[in-house]
Amino acid sequence: MFKCPHCKGQSAVKHGILKRKSKGLVQRYQCSSCRREFVKDNGFKRFRHSPEVITVALDLRAKGLSLADIVDHLDQHHRVKVTRKTILDWQKFFGKKLKSFSQTLIPHLGGIFHADEMFIKARKDWKYYWDCLDYETKFLIADHLSNERNDQEAIEFLNKIKTGSPELPEAIHTDCSYDYPPAFRKVFPRRRIHIQYPSWKKKFKNNPIERLHNTWKQRYKVLRGFDNVAGSKSFFDFLGVYYNFIRKHTTLGNKTPAQAAQIELLLKRNRLKSMIEILLVHYKTRFCC
C-alpha cells in the first residue's frame, strides 16, 4: 500500500506501467479510495528529463564545465538536447532547495575556522565573496556576497558564521583587513578569538581558505563573470552544497566534509540524486498534514 497524494489515503496500489519518452518505464499507482491515478514523486516528478540526465548536468556544472560543453556532452553521450538556460534553471532550483535543507543539518566542527574574501565580477562591477571553513573537517560554514568591503558587511558575515556553527569557535584566522577587528568586537564582544597575520609573514596561517579560493576560481573562470548578483548567489549556493556533501577530499581520507563533520546521510553512488531524494522525504515529513 502507498499513500495517495490527492486524498492522503493509505490504500493506493500498483496500476500498470507508463512509458515515458525521456524517463523510460515508470510505475503507476491508483488510489482505492478516490480512484485517482498518480506517479510516485522521487524529487524529479515535474521535470521533463530523467534524474540521471539532470544530475549529470549539475555534476559537470559543479566540476567547472561551461554550459556549452555540458550541452554538447548530453547530446553526445545521453542523446538528450537541452538548452543552456535549462541547465541554469536546474542549478537555481536544486541549489536553493539543497542549501535550505543543508542548513537544517548540524555539523560537528573542529573549532579552528579560517575566513577570507575574494573578488567576483558581476557585469562590469567587482563584488566581494566572503567565506569561512573549518580547518579540521574542511566544512564550509558560511558565505556572504556584498558590494563593498566594510565594517557592516564584516559584521553580517560574522553573524552568519555564528549562526552556522553549533558552538562558538576557539579561533577564527583572517588576514590583516581593517574591517575585521571592529566587527569581531561587535559580534564576539567577550571572546578573543580573532587571529590575524599579514600574508607576507611566515606565521601566516590562513592557507586553508586560500586553497578553497583556488577551487572556487577553477570553477568560476569558465563563466567569465556573472550577469547579476542574483546569478552569482545562485551559483555559490549550489557550489557550496556540492563542496560540502558531494565532492570527496583526499586529505579527509576520500570523505566529503559533511562525512568528516559526522553528518551521515547514507548517500548512494549517485550522491546528488540520492541527496535530492532525501530532501524530498525531509520536506514531506516536515510539512505533511
Image: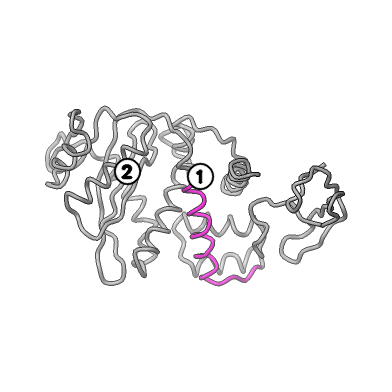
Residue visible at 77% across and 64% down in the picture: 20
Helix, strand or loop at mark 2: helix
Res 134 quadrant in image: top left
Residue 233: percent from left, percent from top: 38, 58
Q: Residues within 10 Å of mark 1 (few under 14, many from 20)?
A: some
Residue visible at 74% across and 47% down in the picture: 8
Residue 35: percent from left, percent from top: 86, 55
Question: Which residue is tagged 2?
Answer: 160
Write the start and end of the magenta stretch as one range. 80-100
Question: Which residue is tagged 1?
Answer: 101
- Dominant secondary structure of the magenta stretch? helix
Q: Quadrant of the N terminus?
A: top right
Label pair 2/1, CB-CB below 8 angstroms: no
Q: Amino acid at mark 2?
A: Lys
Report the front residue among 228 and 110: 228
Specify whether 41 is left or right of 196. Answer: right
Residue 11, magenta (yes or no): no
Helix, strand or loop at mark 1: helix
Residue 67: percent from left, percent from top: 48, 67
Q: How is the image coloured?
A: one colour
Report the front residue among 210 and 19: 19
* Mark 2 or 1, nearer chain start: 1
Residue visible at 53% across and 65% down in the picture: 87
Residue 240: percent from left, percent from top: 42, 48
Q: Amino acid at mark 1?
A: Phe
- How much space separates mark 2 and mark 1, taking CA atoms? 16 Å
Q: Quadrant of the C terminus?
A: top right
Residue visible at 55% across and 72% down in the picture: 83
The answer to whether residue 87 is above or below residue 59 is below
